[in-house]
Amino acid sequence: MPSAEQLKALLRCHLEGDEAQFLSVAMQVAAHEARHGHGKLASELRDLIDRAKARPRAGTVQPVPLVRPKGEMAELFSAGYPKQRLADMVLARETARRLNRLVTEHTQVQKLRAHGLAPRKKLLLVGPPGSGKTLTASVLAGELGLPLFVVRLDALMTKFMGETAAKLRLIFDAIRDVRGVYLFDEFDSIGSSRSLSNDVGEIRRVLNSFLQLIEQDGSDSLLVAATNHADLLDHALFRRFDDVIEYHLPEAREAVALLKAKLATVNLGRIYWAELGKQAAGLSHGDLTRACEEAIKEMIIHGGERITHAVLRQSLVERRDFYQRRKV
């Protein structure tokens, strides 16, 4: 059942007419039920929430039709309509607060514009691999009903002088013309001056072009840049973003919450979560997700009815060992 605080938040949002926050709290309730093994109820709640979000509402931004890139643009983007929601992620409290704030600003954009203000539109995500940065872009697109365009940096970066900067201008033309969430993953490849196959002068020109284009961008799109190497970024970049959010490897409590969420739809035996929290130390969100998938596959292959503590623990140990080998 929802907690007392969640019930009060639901009533408060209803009285204030804040439907976006009402649905956000409702998704938290669905996630709470999923973590407590009530998979069917959680699924029904999510379906109802999705139907509510799809319903036309006066004064809100409707989902943008997905326009698939064509021609040269098709080489620069991959496009899709993500279904993930913030409630599907396990985040540090401060990170969740800041992402919820961004979503609320975009759903209440008319109120902000009435006062000459604009929502945050340029977001920089920094943190170790597997900590949820890329997933965050998908979640923001899902929450806002926007298409997600992932910039293909392998197609953007070329060895010919001036060509990369020209392609970058094409990308910002698309950001202006088609509203969506645009993800620049591994952003340090264009945001830093480290040695690449291109000469250093070309990298510097690309960086200067990006600084100019992001400064001039007045679109309604959301630009998300993600990097594992914030220390390599040019200092001039940081003030071009409206918000910089730092991601960390999950603590024991967060790791257990993530494990419970990922295993909410399967039967579990007696699980000693405190021990698993210790085993999960040092693992990323991606590592924990893979460990859960391995445990589920193990149950299916051997015809088990539920996942045992031993199987889940072994999956975590294997992921931890793999993670340690990657750091060597």
Image: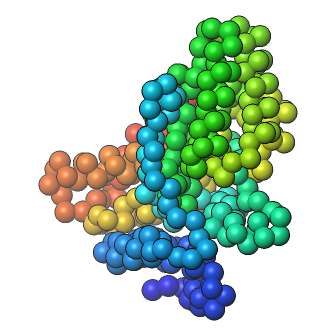
Report the label total. 0
The answer to whether residue 271 is left or right of residue 101 is left
Nearer to me, 263 or 312: 263
Nearer to me, 302 or 206: 206
Colour style of the rendered protein structure? rainbow
Give percent across and percent down for residue 171.
61, 33
The answer to whether residue 275 is left or right of residue 311 is right
Give percent across and percent down for residue 216.
78, 39
Q: Which residue is located at x 84 percent, y 32 percent?
A: 235
Q: Which residue is located at x 29 percent, y 59 percent?
A: 308
Residue 125 versus residue 22 in the image, above or below: above
Q: Which residue is located at x 69 percent, y 48 percent?
A: 219
Residue 273 versus residue 133 in the image, above or below: below
Residue 17 versus residue 82 in the image, above or below: below
Q: Is residue 30 visible?
A: no
Give percent across and percent down for residue 93.
66, 64
Q: Which residue is located at x 45 percent, y 45 percent?
A: 67
Nearer to me, 169 or 204: 169
Question: The N terminus lies in which quarter of the figure?
Answer: bottom left
The answer to whether residue 218 is left or right of residue 173 is right
Give percent across and percent down for residue 130.
54, 42
Q: Is residue 28 visible?
A: yes
Question: The C terminus lies in which quarter of the figure?
Answer: top right
